[in-house]
Image (cartoon, rainbow, N blue to C red):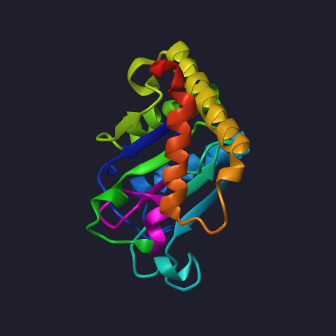
Amino acid sequence: MGITIHYKGRINDPVLPVRNTQTGNIDRLIDEISDICEDMRWEYTIIEKDENDIDHPPRLLVGQAVKGIVFSIHEGCEPVGFIFDKKGYLRSPISIPFYEENDKHQLVVSVKTQFSSPDIHIVLIKLLRYIKSKYIENLEVIDEGEYWETSNKERLKYLFDFLNEKLNMIGDILKENKTNFSESDSPEQIADKVEKLLLKYMFKNKKE
């Protein structure tokens, strides 16, 4: 639960060149994003296969022609990734250790912004618009905050506030009823108890 931005696409004119000998769009994107990160003081990690060092990047990436960059724009926002496979398609950073070339679900990158702010959400949307205009023409974005489609900051703020209110309400309900749960509860039992509590407290006014 929470506002999330989902995006997928393929780099323009995909090529995976050897750095320092040939430059392609993936390398240009990595270089530009890393420059932005430096200017904005965002932490970032460049992911790149190094034929001379099997431990860089992690062993799980060796043999999988992936390269890209992952960075953090705010402590309340999930890391943002632009990682490409050998065909130039974006790959979800969290799926890399479980890389499956033909898994379409791994071609969608999701970044939850709910615990940052509307302004941080807008920064990421503006960055995605720039990436689409220069590097990934077919970039598809699903923005649960609706800013990608509308540029409506008031609507975005409303959605942030609405969901934060509901999340806080859920937290309060669970805290007040923590004695309903025990360490021996199975995941199914916990889910069932949570569902009953939410139905009882969050929707009681509708029933009345």
The reply to whether the magenta stretch includes residue 44 is no
Furthest toward the left, the residue is: 102
Residue nearer the viewer, 4 or 23: 4
Q: Quadrant of residue 114?
A: top right
Q: Position of residue 24 (x, y in %)?
A: 40, 57
Residue nearer the viewer, 132 or 7: 7
Q: Position of residue 203 (x, y in %)?
A: 50, 27
Up-down: is 8 above or below 153? below
Which residue shows up at 67% across the image and 40% down it?
A: 171
- What range is drawn magenta here? 81-97
The reply to whether the magenta stretch includes residue 87 is yes
Residue nearer the viewer, 63 or 94: 94
Which residue shows up at 66% across the image and 33% down it?
A: 168
Q: Position of residue 185 (x, y in %)?
A: 58, 64
Which residue shows up at 51% across the image and 67% down it?
A: 20
Residue nearer the viewer, 76 or 90: 76
Tell whether 78 sits left or right of 82.
right
Up-down: is 21 above or below 74? below
Count of residue discs: 0
Q: Position of residue 122 (x, y in %)?
A: 55, 28
Which residue shows up at 47% across the image and 61% down it?
A: 188
Res 67 visible: no
Tell whether 116 sits left or right of 30.
right
